[in-house]
Image (cartoon, rainbow, N blue to C red):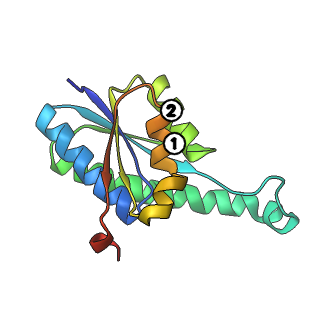
C-alpha cells in the first residue's frame, strides 16, 4: 500500500499528533518515513532589521530543525521505522508538495490544528497540501479539547 510516507513536522502540538499517527501507520505497514521541516521566513521584501539578522535567524531555524528532526528520528527508530530527515526553505505547503513529488512518496501524513468554524473556511497549510498534493494526504485534526 504505502512504502514511503512523508511527515511534515515543525514540533507543534498538531505536528506531533500527525507524526505519531504517521509513525504508527508506517510501523503497521512496514513503510519508511521522510520527515520534513520547512523554514519559512515571512516578509517580502524583507524589513531592513530582519535582513541584517537573516543569517542568524536561518541558523537558529536550522538548529531547531536538526533538534526536532533528530528527536522524531529517534522515536521512529524505537518503533522500528526507518526515517530520512530533510530541511527546506520556502512556502511551507508548496515545499511539502514539491518534496512529496521529488522523493516519490506514497502518502503524506500530517496533523491539523483545531481552528473553529471560521478557520475551516479560510484554510491553512494542511488544507493547501490536501488541495494540491498528487498523492493521498492523511490528516489528523485536533479537537477543541486537545488545544493546550
Q: Residue at x 49, y 24 (%)?
A: 102
| Crowd around label 1: few <14 · some 14–19 · many ≥20 (10 Å) | some
Q: Residue at x 21, y 31 (%)?
A: 31
Q: Mark 1: which secondary structure?
A: helix
In the foreground, 95 or 34: 95
Q: Mark 2: which secondary structure?
A: helix
* Residue linked to disc 2: 132
Q: Is residue 26 above or below residue 55?
A: above
Label placed on residue 128: 1
> Residue 108's x, y, as percent?
36, 37
Q: Residue at x 17, y 51 (%)?
A: 78
Say which quadrant the C terminus sits in. bottom left
In the foreground, 20 or 32: 20
| Crowd around label 2: few <14 · some 14–19 · many ≥20 (10 Å) | some
Q: Residue at x 53, y 30 (%)?
A: 98
Q: Is residue 131 left or right of residue 88?
A: left
Q: Are marks 1 and 2 in contact (CB under 8 Å)?
A: yes
> Residue 72's x, y, as percent?
31, 53
In the foreground, 67 or 122: 122
Amino acid at each position: 500500500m504505502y512504502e514511503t510516507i512523508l511527515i511534515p513536522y515543525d514540533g507543534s502540538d498538531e505536528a506531533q499528533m500527525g507524526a505519531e499517527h504517521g509513525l504508527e501507520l508506517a510501523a503497521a505497514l512496514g513503510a519508511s518515513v521522510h520527515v520534513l521541516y520547512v523554514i519559512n521566513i515571512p516578509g517580502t521584501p524583507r524589513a531592513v532589521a530582519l535582513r541584517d539578522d537573516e543569517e542568524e535567524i536561518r541558523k537558529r531555524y536550522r538548529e531547531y530543525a536538526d533538534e526536532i528532526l533528530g528527536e522524531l528520528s529517534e522515536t521512529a527508530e524505537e518503533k522500528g521505522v526507518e526515517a530520512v530527515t530533510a530541511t527546506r526553505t520556502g512556502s511551507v505547503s508548496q515545499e511539502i508538495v514539491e518534496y512529496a513529488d521529488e522523493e516519490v512518496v506514497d502518502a503524506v501524513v500530517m496533523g491539523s490544528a483545531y481552528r473553529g468554524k471560521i478557520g475551516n473556511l479560510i484554510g491553512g497549510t494542511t488544507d493547501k497540501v490536501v488541495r494540491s498534493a498528487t498523492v493521498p494526504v492523511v490528516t489528523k485534526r485536533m479537537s477543541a479539547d486537545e488545544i493546550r
